[in-house]
Amino acid sequence: MTTIPYDQTCDPGYSHLRVVLDRFPELKEVAKTANIDDNEFSNLPDDSFAWPGKRRYPLHTREHTALSLGYRKLAGAVPTEVDQMLEKAASVYEIDPSIFEVSEAEKTASEERYVFPEKQRFLVKTAEDVKLAEQRIREVYPQLTVEDRAEGLFNLCKFAEELGVTLSPSTEKLAGFTLTSTRKLKDWLEARQEVTRGRVYGDAFAKLAESLEGVAPEIHDRTFQVELASAIHELDKEAGITNLYGRKLPDPIQTVFNSEKLAANTLEFGTGMMLDKNKLAALPLSFWKDLLGDSIAAEISSDGETVNPEALMHLLPTLPADVKAIAQKQLASYV
């Protein structure tokens, strides 16, 4: 399982930011003027991020570089070049590395890893602990706040990746790592409209459903997905229908992250074209040589025979516009 680490561009309720700032108190002063509104990141070019292909870890200001470093310190594995970019930016902005030093007491405490660290619930040391925590979280899920669901399931997925545990697809869906089926989303918004018919909230749900007209069949923009989930959550609370979760209605996270497709395994390649990593990697290397040429194809294969899917997913968005247009036509039959 591969998950994309959280950062300030994608942190539902900023629950992970609170953990970062608690862990590195001196970071609060350095980053206190950082603007973490979504509009801050939407117009930035890809090279303003330490992880350009995923648009993660922004580096466009000193404050955001410091925040990116803080998030990265608590994340799982990322490509080596991401850490290199972060280190380079930290040097350019003269960010004191001692901000992120952890005391011996903290190092000892950090060995006690909890799915909910602030509450010290669900201790995880082994692969067996991960599976037990997954089972228990599923049992108490209805009682958790939206913020706790986001934080707890994110931590669970991180521990699972580190310990080589495969979580169930439904758990990954609840953690918000899946694509959104626009059709299913509209269905659940219309269901909310039906249960609030005759009230102002019915119109609000109707307008939200109408806003999805013309949107691609699948949504993989996590920032947009989280915004939708938050908007639905607020409407549900105001309409007084949260008591219907798990019975007539799914909660906002399940409403939005409603498919079985992992976002990390897909790539938007051109308007409305969603490519599946596993399907692309199954194509023979000769296909990519014919399409991209030997030199470019060599970048996605370490042995000259098989395709490295991670390298392929990183390469495709960087293709020149003319090559990308040709690739879109050739790949259309594999969507």
Image: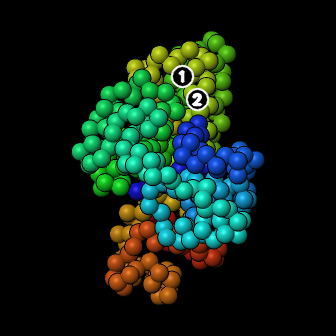
Q: Quadrant of the C terminus?
A: bottom left
- The residue at the far bottom in this view is 294
Q: Residue at x 38, y 64 (%)?
A: 279
Q: Which of 197 and 29 lies nearest the eye of the viewer?
A: 29
Instruction: Please give left or right for residue 70 compared with residue 34 in the image.
Output: left
What is the three-letter code of the residue carrying label 1? Arg
> Is residue 187 in view from this perspective?
no
Number of on-image labels: 2
- The residue at the far left in this view is 128
Can you give x and y, in whole percent of width and height, for residue 193 in the image? 57, 21
Q: Which of 266 and 127 lies nearest the eye of the viewer?
A: 127
Q: Residue at x 70, y 70 (%)?
A: 92
Q: Residue at x 38, y 44 (%)?
A: 113
Q: Which residue is mark 1?
A: 192
What is the three-letter code of the residue carrying label 2? Ile
Can you give x and y, in whole percent of width and height, for residue 50 in the image? 60, 65
Q: Residue at x 44, y 38 (%)?
A: 117
Q: Is residue 72 above or below residue 227?
A: below
Q: Which residue is mark 2?
A: 232
Protein image colouring:
rainbow
